[in-house]
Image: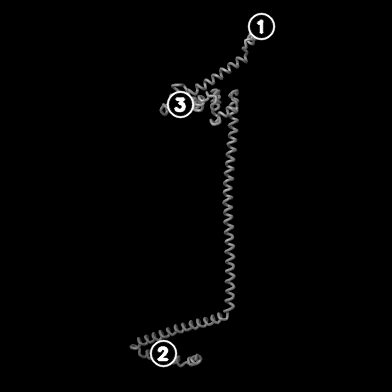
Amino acid sequence: MTDTVTDTVTDVISGRTPHVIAAEINMIKYQTERIYLAAAVEIGRRLTEAKALLKYGEWGKWLKESVSYSQSTADRFMKVFREYGSKLLDASDSNSDYAPVRNLTYSQAVILLGVPEEGREQFIIDMDIEGMTNQELRKAINERTQVRQEKDQALQENADLQKTVEDQSGIITELTTELANLKVQLENVKTSKAELDKTARQLKDSLESLQQSSSAKGYEKMKTNFINTALKVRANHIAFLCENLDKTIKDVKQELLKIAPNDKEAYITYKNKVYDLLNVWLKDETWSRQARNAD
C-alpha cells in the first residue's frame, strides 16, 4: 500500500498521470492516422497506376497474389487517392483552399467520402471535426445528408410546383386567347344574324309590295295560263284520237283487201259497214252546232 502511494506521488511530481499518458496515446494515434492517410494516398496512387498497366481480368488476381488486398480495400485506397491526393499536396500551403483537409486522419477522410466533394472542405470548417470522434462524425454526416435530401426534395417539389404553375399559366393563356377568339366569332355571328334579319325583312317587304301591286294581274294571268294549258291538253288528246282513228281505218282497209280475193261477200259486207259508220258520223248534227257556236 505504501509503495503504491509512493509511486503515485512520484508520478504526480514527475507529471506522469494516467490522463497525461492517455493524451500521449491519443496524440500518437492521431499522428499515426495522419501518417496512415498519407500512406493510403500513396498506396492508392500506385494501385491506380498498376491497374492501368494490367490487362482486363487480371486485376483481382494481381491484388490477391501481389499485395494481399481485396478489391474493396483497393477501391477504397484508390478513391482516397482520387479525392485527397492533390488536395493534401496543396494543403501544405496555409493559404490554400484545401487547407481544411491538412489535419484529417485516415478514418475521418474515409468517413468524409460520404460528403460530396464540392462541399467537403466547407463541412470540415463548419463542423470543426478535429475534436469529434468517428461516431460523432458519422452522425453529423448522416444528419447533413438527411437535411440535404430534405432540401433537395423541397427544391424538387418547388420545381415541380413551379412547372405546374407554368403549365397552368400556359393553359390559362391558351384558354384566354381561345375565349377572346370566341368572343370575336360571337360578335361576327351577331353581325351576320343582324344582316340576315335585315335582308329577310327587306325581302318580306318586297314580296308583300309585289303581291299588293300585282295580285289582280297575277290572278288573270294565272287563269289564262290554266285555260291555255287545258286547251292544249285537250287538243293533244284529240290529235291522239285522230291518229288512232286513222290507224284503225287503215288497218280495217288492209284486212278487207286481204280477204277480198277469197271472200268477196265478206269484203263487201264489212266495207259497206265502214261507209255507213262514216256517213253517220259525218251527218251528226253535233258537228254543225259546235261549228256555229265557235263562230
Q: Nearer the viewer, mark 3 or mark 2?
A: 3
Q: Nearer the viewer, mark 1 or mark 3?
A: 3
* Location of residue 254 in the rendering, given as x and y in whole percent from the top left corner: 37, 86
> In the rendered image, which quarter is residue 46 located in?
top left
C-alpha separation, residue under disc 3 versus residue under disc 2: 140 Å
Instruction: Work out whether mark 1 precedes mark 2 in sequence or the reverse, and give the earlier one.
Output: 1
Q: Do the residues bearing badges 1 and 3 touch, measured as CB atoms within 8 Å?
A: no
Which of 267/129 is in front?
A: 129
Residue 82 visible in the displayed image: yes
Using a 10 Å C-alpha cutoff, classify the residue at mark 1 as few (fewer than 14 neighbours), some (14 to 19) or many (20 or more).
Answer: few
Q: Amino acid at mark 3?
A: Thr
Residue, disc 2:
274
Q: Amino acid at mark 1?
A: Thr
> In the rendered image, which quarter is residue 241 located in?
bottom left
Instruction: Identify the element where label 1 is drawn.
Output: helix
* Location of residue 208 in the rendering, given as x and y in whole percent from the top left corner: 59, 75
Residue, disc 1:
2
Using a 10 Å C-alpha cutoff, classify the residue at mark 3 as few (fewer than 14 neighbours), some (14 to 19) or many (20 or more).
Answer: some
Using a 10 Å C-alpha cutoff, classify the residue at mark 2 as few (fewer than 14 neighbours), some (14 to 19) or many (20 or more).
Answer: few
Q: Do the residues bearing badges 3 and 2 touch, measured as CB atoms within 8 Å?
A: no
Residue 80 visible in the displayed image: no
Residue, disc 3:
48
Q: Amino acid at mark 2?
A: Val
In screen coordinates, is 235 left or right of 13?
left
